Image (cartoon, grey):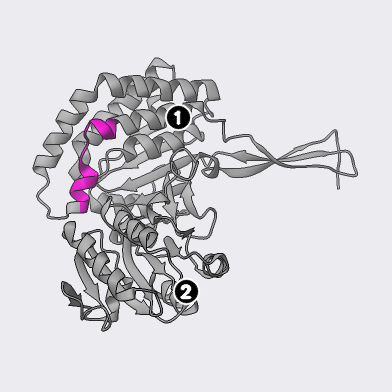
């Protein structure tokens, strides 16, 4: 068992990591080029997540630097109570112990998610996808160097080079204690982990996010939000998939035509219900199954809807429980929508692309949970803790 590292050591390791990422920047990008060349798949969002360029390295450096500046999430007093018998009782945050992060194609997870888990006092086990092995191993070498320089065991960050069978065996019968598993990836990965894991799993769920254009929407805002949420980063789980347009929207026809023409500039494939399909450039929605799908592609589905209540019901039926937005100038309608839509983040007149730890003030996130326990939405540093009771007495018995 590794004894909890002092906050000074944890911060020093993170700052050393920032220094090493800068120093090894060219090498990381070069090694990543090999991973990109070896990737034979045709999943454009997977390729996008696999790629490491200067901007990605900058983000990694910013993430560990910011983590080092944040308060220690471990040992924070949540509750205190003086018992009648004189005992002093405290409840404080505590680290989980060992956190296993299983992820696909994203070398930045090896820095950012591992950094959050490490700062919150946990030992890290990393199991990346085979497509990013070389990039990941290079980054883990840097973790080990940062740990060694600060007199800490390299066991704090361990990379598991397992194939699928070995991963399944490890999930079912771990060869070391694992307290929490965080899968970062598509629905198949999440289902695989849930099926085989023997300890708690934080589900970083799918997107399938909706924007509802209410009848009193500001159409310029609606257009701007939809285009941003759909096209800015198609591989993100906070990207937009579905648009519901109020049947009573003012200038509805003009708005739909403008929306189609803007989406076509980005080569977005547009699917529409019977009301929207009559516009040029729109394909028919073949089945209701489409409404359940997260596209992670330049693809969108648009339908007309009768009211805010109908929009809420549709979103609650089909969405992934991640993010949804209402575009309206009517505050009361926005309030009803936001209180009743069952997603981790709800927006009024803003893009779903903000469901992100950095954007929502957490500094970064380990995952974006669509579970309701123990934290929903972006899981930041302060959420990656459990708690413990500290009771001080002088001989009290019950």
- For marks 2 and 1, give the one nearer the viewer: 2
Which comes before the other along the chain, label 2 or label 1?
A: 1
Evaluate if marks 2 and 1 touch, with contact meaning CB atoms under 8 Å apart.
no
Element under disc 1: helix
Quarter of the figure with residue 76:
top right
Question: Picture coordinates of residue 54 (x, y %)?
Answer: 23, 30
- Which span of residues is magenta-colored? 45-57
Of the pair 166 and 386, the residue shown nearer to us: 386
- Which residue bears the numbered disc 2? 312
Q: CA distance from mark 2 to mark 1?
A: 37 Å
Residue 273, how many percent across, how many down?
Answer: 27, 80
Comparing 21 with 144, the one in front is 21
Q: Taking 277 as reference, is 362 left or right?
A: right
Asked whether residue 241 is drawn in magenta, I would say no
Location of residue 397 (image quadrant): top right
Tag 2's secondary structure? helix
- Can residue 234 be seen here? no
Measured along the vertical axis of the image, is residue 7 above or below residue 193? above
Give the vertical position of 256 relative to 128 (above or below): below
Q: Position of residue 102 (x, y in %)?
A: 33, 47
Q: Is residue 109 left or right of residue 71?
A: left
Q: Mark 1 = which residue?
A: 66
What crowding class fits label 1: few (fewer than 14 Cα within 10 Å), some (14-19), or many (20 or more)? some
Q: Could you tell me which residue is drawn at 48 percent across and 36 percent down?
A: 122
Residue 284 spot, x, y in % from top left: 20, 79
Toward the bottom, the furthest residue is 274
């Amino acid at each position: 068992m590794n004894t909890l590292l002092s906050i000074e050591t944890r911060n020093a390791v993170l700052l050393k990591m920032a220094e090493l990422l800068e120093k090894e920047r060219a090498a990381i990008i070069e090694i990543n080029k090999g991973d990109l060349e070896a990737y034979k798949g045709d999943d454009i969002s997977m390729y996008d997540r696999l790629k490491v360029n200067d901007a990605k390295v900058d983000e990694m450096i910013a993430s560990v630097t910011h983590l080092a500046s944040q308060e220690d999430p471990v040992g924070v007093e949540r509750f205190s109570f003086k018992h009648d018998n004189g005992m002093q009782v405290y409840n404080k945050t505590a680290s989980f112990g060992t956190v296993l992060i299983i992820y696909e194609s994203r070398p930045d997870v090896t820095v950012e998610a591992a950094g959050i888990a490490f700062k919150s006092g946990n030992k890290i086990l990393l199991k990346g996808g085979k497509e990013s092995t070389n990039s990941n191993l290079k980054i883990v070498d840097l973790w080990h160097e940062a740990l060694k320089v600060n007199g800490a065991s390299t066991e704090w960050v361990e990379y598991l080079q397992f194939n699928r069978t070995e991963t399944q065996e490890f999930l079912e019968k771990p060869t070391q204690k694992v307290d929490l598993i965080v899968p970062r990836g598509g629905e198949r990965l999440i289902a695989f982990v849930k099926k085989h894991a023997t300890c708690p799993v934080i589900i970083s769920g799918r997107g399938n996010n909706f924007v509802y254009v209410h009848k009193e929407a500001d159409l310029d805002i609606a257009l701007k939000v939809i285009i941003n949420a759909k096209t800015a980063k198609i591989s993100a789980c906070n990207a937009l998939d579905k648009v519901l347009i109020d049947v009573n929207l003012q200038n509805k026809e003009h708005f739909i035509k403008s929306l189609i023409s803007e989406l076509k500039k980005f080569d977005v494939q547009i699917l529409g219900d019977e009301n929207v399909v009559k516009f040029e450039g729109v394909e028919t929605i073949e089945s209701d199954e489409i409404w359940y799908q997260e596209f992670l592609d330049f693809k969108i589905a648009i339908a007309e809807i009768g009211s805010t209540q109908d929009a809420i019901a549709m979103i609650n039926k089909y969405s992934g429980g991640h993010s949804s937005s209402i575009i309206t100038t009517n505050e009361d309608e926005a309030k009803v929508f936001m209180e009743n839509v069952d997603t981790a983040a709800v927006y009024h007149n803003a893009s779903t692309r903000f469901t992100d730890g950095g954007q929502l003030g957490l500094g970064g996130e380990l995952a974006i949970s669509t579970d309701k326990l123990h934290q929903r939405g972006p899981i930041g540093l302060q959420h990656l803790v459990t708690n413990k009771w500290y009771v001080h007495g002088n001989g009290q018995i019950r």
